[in-house]
Amino acid sequence: MRKIPSALFLALFYCLNIYPAAAGSKSPDLIPIHDLMQDPLIDQVKISPDGKTIAALYNNNDRIVVLVKDLDSDDSQPVFINVLNHDVKWIEWKNDQRIIAGSYVEGGLWDEYYALVVMDKNGSNMRHLISDFKVGSIIDLLPDDPDHVLVEELSFDNQDYPEVWKVSIGNLSDETRIQASKINIDHWITDANGNVKMGVTWLSDKRIIEAKMADGTWKTINKRNYVKDPLFEPLAIGKTGIAYVLSRHENDKAALYEYDIETQTFGRQLFKHDLVDIDDVYYSRLKDTVEYASFTVDKEAIHFFDDQLSKDYLAVNQALPNTTNLIVSQSADEKRLIIFSSKENSPESYYLFDREKRKITFLGSRYPSLDKISLSKTKSIKYQARDGMTIYGYVSVPVSFDKSTPFPMVVLVHGGPYLRDENKFDPWVHFLTNRGYIVFQPNFRGSTGYGDAYWKSGYRQWGLSMEDDIIDGVKELINGNIADKNNICIMGGSYGGYAALMGVAKYSDIFRCALSIAGVSDLNSLLIAQRFKGSTNYYNHILIGDDVSERKAVSPITHVENINRPVLLAHGTEDKTVYFSQSSNMYSALKGAKKDVTFIKLKDETHYLEDIKNRVELFEAIEKFLDKNMGGSSGKKQ
């Protein structure tokens, strides 16, 4: 087994006038595209239950393997483990000796799936956790049982609704079914005792949650229409039957509550934020309580319920100032923590924090090739849309930016669209700013995280107010003397690709070019393709609209004649989220109308640009396209 250099592990004792003039600054060298687009060198660092060993994903020449390192021996060399010659997507410690990995597999009995693989921490005694004739996901690591995990499984005999099996993680496969499948139950949730406590059903128009009562019966505790009813999202279930849920039944913003399953009533509101939704919680099985909740105004932040942990976290922030520091893994006794430290203008890093010794140890950078390179900073902005609604977003500027001169700008529109951008390290942003472009990322109406009203204001506004919000932000940046009004392009993936195409169709006087990556061009064909996808189809019919003529009116392919600027289309041939035909048909329509269009076909690629070769090919094409249509890069190649 090959060794990894131990040098990776070193010990370590708004307003728009927000950018000062960069007097005397010069354009940095161009960062190689591969350095920006590659998978992180290390990722998902997890600490063993005894706190003595870490495991992580490791990028070994573009193959993602498992890395293991002894923390308490300075002489020990990290090793990495090839898992069945497949890229590893996630890892978990089961006990102090055994690791479970999720490895992405194409082909085989299940076409595409995540194989569950269990192994010793030195890579020996590796085997599939469950039979090749089954596909499953872990729903409980059972930390109080060192020899088993709970897996919800589908099999050739039962391909519709999962069963829950107690599965041995030892050298020999052994399974015991503890929960039979139930009609319409698509997912099971356990409590802190390791008992199956809830079952979740996703129907076309609603989600139903059933819970197991103390007497063994099952009752429906929540029935929620995806759009009309308030959020009810169980995040953890304690040992006494108290659930911790996110809900909007009292507020526009999602707040954290206790919920009594037996009485089906809400208890205390534990935490809310006035500006944004609560994102998640960390529940401690050791203490049988919620220790902290996370939320994102601009950067992810933590609200603590545990006073001592809050004090220790303050020590981390003092040791790692001006960064966002998140707890991503803990030992079983919660005395050793893995800290994920990040800021927008430097690569993220992992640290070990020993709470008893008050010692922080640097474990490694996700992108060490970028550590000593000057990267752009990002600032949050807010502005008024034309109807008076406040819209939020982010602006990133090149290192060489001088506010006395407007710069060329790329509008980078997020996908979803029911997601949001936040202020964090983003390789796409740094690719663009390193090439000399300002990057504007608008969280247009319909974006999530800002409360119920904010995202619902995007109801049936594809190509309408959602698009206008983007333009209103662009005009604000033009008026603020930040963006060069004659040199602006719009770019995005998935919904962002749709917005780029609609932007250049509606506002060709503003945009010089458009780049659509796996973008939607025809809403009617999109919904036809999704007609068998249940809740996804219902969701889109409600939020996009169920009138065929209205959907046609806001489809980019309808407005090909209005597109008089260069367009770059890129799409993976194996995209099963937004089908390849969305771009190939748009290309044919643009080409037939004799428009300036380039089409990059990404062979065997999915919706998520998983292949590094395809990512590099795509961004090489983007670089050439922007050079041609926006006057060239400002930096110099290394």
Image: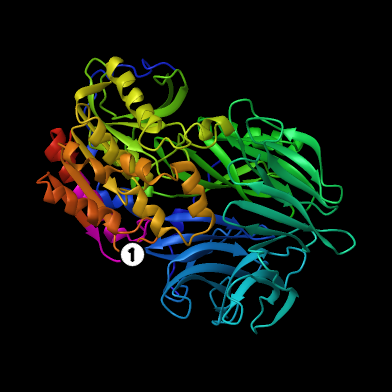
Q: What span is colored magenta in the figure?
A: 601-622
Q: Residue furthest bottom?
A: 172
* Viewer-proximal residue among 382 and 161: 161
Instruction: Answer with left or right where residue 390 lies relative to residue 242.
Output: left
> Is 637 drawn above or below residue 509 in the view shown?
below
Q: Position of residue 74 (x, y in %)?
A: 55, 58
Residue 451 seen from this side: no
Give residue 82's position: percent from left, percent from top.
45, 72
State yes or no: residue 319 in magenta.
no
User: What amino acid is found at the position of numbered circle 1 in the picture?
Assistant: Glu
Q: Which residue sits furthest left?
A: 594
Secondary structure at badge 1 equals loop
Compared across the picture, whether 121 is left or right of 523 comes to right
Can you say whether 353 is above or below 611 in the image? above
Q: Residues within 10 Å of mark 1 (few under 14, many from 20)?
A: some
Q: Nearer the viewer, residue 162 or 24?
A: 162
Q: Quick one: which residue is furthest to the right in this view? A: 215
Q: Residue at x 30, y 48 (%)?
A: 521
- In the displayed structure image, the side of residue 589 where residue 147 appears, left or right: right
The answer to whether residue 80 shows anywhere in this view is yes
Q: Residue 576's spot in the image, x, y percent?
A: 39, 61
How many discs appear? 1
- Residue 341 at x, y = what percent? 52, 41
- Quadrant in the rendering for residue 293: top right
Please tell me in which quadrant of the rendered image residue 453 appears. Answer: top right
Looking at the rendering, in which quadrant would you find the N terminus?
Answer: bottom left
Magenta span contains residue 609: yes
- The residue beneath circle 1 is 574
Task: Name the residue nearer the viewer: 306 or 294.
Answer: 294
